[in-house]
Image (cartoon, rainbow, N blue to C red):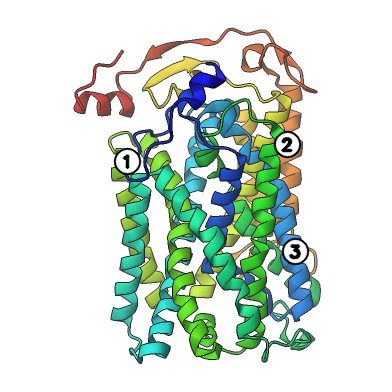
Amino acid sequence: MSNDARVSTAPPRITEVEQHGVDTIPASERTSGPFDLFRIQFGGANTFATVLLGTFPIALGLSFWQAVAATLLGVIVGALILSPMGLFGPRTGTNNAVSSGAHVGVRGRIVGSFLSLLTAIAFYSISVWVSGDAIVGALGRLAGVGDSPLLRSVVYALIGALVIVVVVYGYQFMLFVNKIAVIANTVLFLLAIIAFAGVFDAGYNPGPSHYALGSFWPTFILSALIVMSNPISFGAFLGDWARYIPKETPVRKLIGATLLGQLASLVPFLFGVATATIVAGNVDYVVGLVKASPLWYALVLIVVAFIGGLSTGTTSLYGTGLDFSSVFPRFTRVQATIGIGTLAFLFILIGRLLFDLLGAVNAFVGAIVVTTTPWMIILAIAFWTHRGWYDESDLQVFNRGEIGGRYWFTGGVNWRGLGAWIVAATVGLLFSNYPPIVVGPFRDLAGGIDLSLLSGILIAAVLYLAALIVFPEPDHCFGPDGPRLVPSKPGTPAPIVHNHASAASRAAVRRGRTVG
């Protein structure tokens, strides 16, 4: 397809319901660029959900400057791990979960769908929780509206429903929302410099007796890992948006878009760190923030909360609807999106009104970091060893109700990648220390310092590379230039045949389509 043919197709209007699921995006419809990838990441992170994660280092007992250092470490390390995840979509024309089928098998790629679901529920919930609480608190400050579980539920429902509406329309509407979030919320966050200039103290330091884990280093590492969960949470989703970028886009531009998008998220992160020192001691950060704000900034918080709730919620929920509809083909993308959104909303009500918010957030972000990071490491190594070459059609066999192809391996599973992920994620959970829920039996092995990330990364990298060397993949899994660093063995792709017993085939029959 020539460049002229590709750019001649204008992007659809934002009010057109997106028709694509996880099928390959045609070259003529790949009308986005690296700047769009930057905007959708920064827009999705430039919200109160990120602010909440930024308050954790202070809540765990660090001083202001210690919290800033932990935040910088978490964002930078997370961005470096995340950056290769934006390379798959342009090469494969589909999302990262389906793309991972080249390395864990077209059935094994369900792992990516699970990680996407876990992340979506967590960050959709955090986004609606925090944005809803900010709006309720600001309404109380500005209009004297009394707080109540009913009012919070109504506000949660409003934000949650609007998120679902945006996601149902699809990628273009979501991109539009995040374009607004990039500019509007950045300006509104920076206005905090004026709002809190008289009460902020950069010398805030509660002292060593306040360290949540008893000493500095365990508390510092936990704080950095919680912050890092934000960039890591984008790992399963980058391909949802990058698949609309042309295949020929230079790698350096894609890597740069992700790095800059995550570094820009320091705006809401540092807002959270700074304002957490002002309201330290309050049980509820959002309520404390609204009370500490000048009256005019309480009104600003409503706007920030509303825009942010939409942007984070849409970036989280969009990809999961895609994945769920492909794993369970009886559901369309729209049906899957509405179903998961409803499930997540119920989780919001139960979790926010009946349980501890910070404990639930800590548990989810811990699970995300420990399980998603090894998956990302394996995919990054695989992209490099396979020279970024993929067969777009053979990646889709599972979604078409077929078996066989280049990436069928053993029953649709490539145990080289999947086995390395299972071991790495399991070991990471054993070392994890995200109290009070995700606490592994080996958490105290290094004096309370969380080794879950380091152990997960090392084991994933070592086991996967060892598996590629000891058990070489067939040469048809690589492009014309062959593998990089690792060996391959002769082989012939399994013939692609239709599986009439598959869920995709049965769904196609129910919808009146002819199959195989």
Rounded to the nearest angstrom, the CA distance separating label 2 from label 3 is 23 Å
How dense is the environment of label 2, judged by Cα within 10 Å: few (below 14), some, or many (20 and up)? Answer: few
Q: As shown in the figure, which amino acid type bears the numbered disc 2?
A: Arg
> With 278 as the anchor, is 360 left or right in this view?
left
In front: 338, or 243?
Answer: 243
Q: Are marks 2 and 1 in contact (CB under 8 Å)?
A: no
Circle 1 SS class: loop
Q: As shown in the figure, which amino acid type bears the numbered disc 1?
A: Glu
- Which of the 4 quarters of the picture holds residue 226? bottom right
* Residue on which the image places disc 2: 252
* Residue on which the image places disc 1: 16
How dense is the environment of label 3, judged by Cα within 10 Å: few (below 14), some, or many (20 and up)? Answer: some
Disc 2 versus disc 1: nearer the observer:
1
Q: Residue 401 location, x and y as percent?
A: 36, 22
Residue 72 badge: 3
Q: As shown in the figure, which amino acid type bears the numbered disc 3?
A: Leu
Q: Is residue 81 above or below residue 203?
A: above
